[in-house]
Image: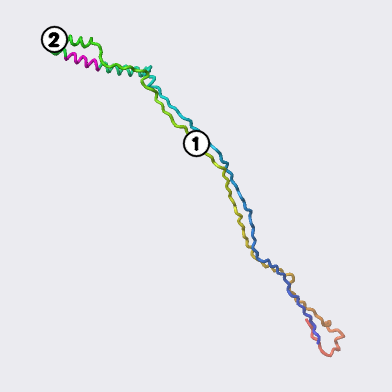
Amino acid sequence: MEPLLKITTTPMEYELKIQRARLEYSSSKSEVINNHTKGGFTMENHPIKLHLDTYDARNSVCPTTTESVRQAASKGKSAAMEATATYAKESAMLLSPNSNALNQIFTQRAQQPTGEFGLRFIPNTGPEIEWSDPDLSMQYQMDRLSFDIKVANGNFEFIPGSVEMSITQMPDVNIEYIGKPIYVPPSSANLFSHAPMDVLA
């Protein structure tokens, strides 16, 4: 007996897309930065300094008002002290029983001064002179050139792999009847059949 059904199957079809893992490297540019500092030459000159003080020399020739007052006060003080001493001596002589005390006092006042006399030149003092040494300083600064290097730092990036699956055809089962037609009720062609036939629902 021949088969009445023909069964065919359609398998499932799929497509795989595989992306491999990879390591990517990206680099930056290196840089060189230079800095230039300009030098120079400097020179400082301090000439000689002279300090001349003629105050005392001028006062010995022509004193100022302040100096004249000071000298006059000093001379007046000396004269008062000398006069006090002379009057004290003469008073002591008058108190003595000597009758010639007045004659001695008059003789001492009338006598010529004695002693050594010196010749004085004016001005009697010189000026005060002070001076400082000259100074010369030189400074030379050379040009300076500095470099700054920035090294490139590479960056590594890891990209993981991936697997993509896409179904291009779904599975299927196809059932096909390949037998002869079956009539319900049976046709006249099947009345004289020797063997009964099952009716397929």
Q: Quadrant of the C terminus?
A: bottom right
Q: Earlier in the sequence, mark 1 or mark 2?
A: 2
Residue 68, image x and y in percent? Answer: 35, 17
- Looking at the image, residue 96 sits to the left or right of residue 56; the answer is left
Give the numbered dot on residue 99.
Answer: 2
Residue 89 among magenta residues: yes
Bounds of the magenta segment: 81-92
| Element on which disc 2 rests | loop
Q: Amino acid at mark 2?
A: Ser
Q: Amino acid at mark 1?
A: Ser
Cα separation between marks 1 and 2? 87 Å
> Which residue occupies the foreground of this view, 78 or 136?
136
Residue 37: quadrant of the picture: top right
Give the numbered dot on residue 137.
Answer: 1
Residue 82 among magenta residues: yes
Residue 124: quadrant of the picture: top left
Give the overall secondary structure of the magenta segment: helix
| Element on which disc 1 rests | strand
Residue appearing at x 51%, y 34% in the figure: 44
> Counting other residues with Cα less than 10 Å from the Cα at mark 2, is it few (<14), some (14-19), or many (20 or more)?
few
Residue 199, image x and y in percent? Answer: 79, 84
Residue 113, image x and y in percent? Answer: 25, 13
> Which residue occupies the foreground of this view, 97 or 103?
103
Residue appearing at x 47%, y 32% in the figure: 134
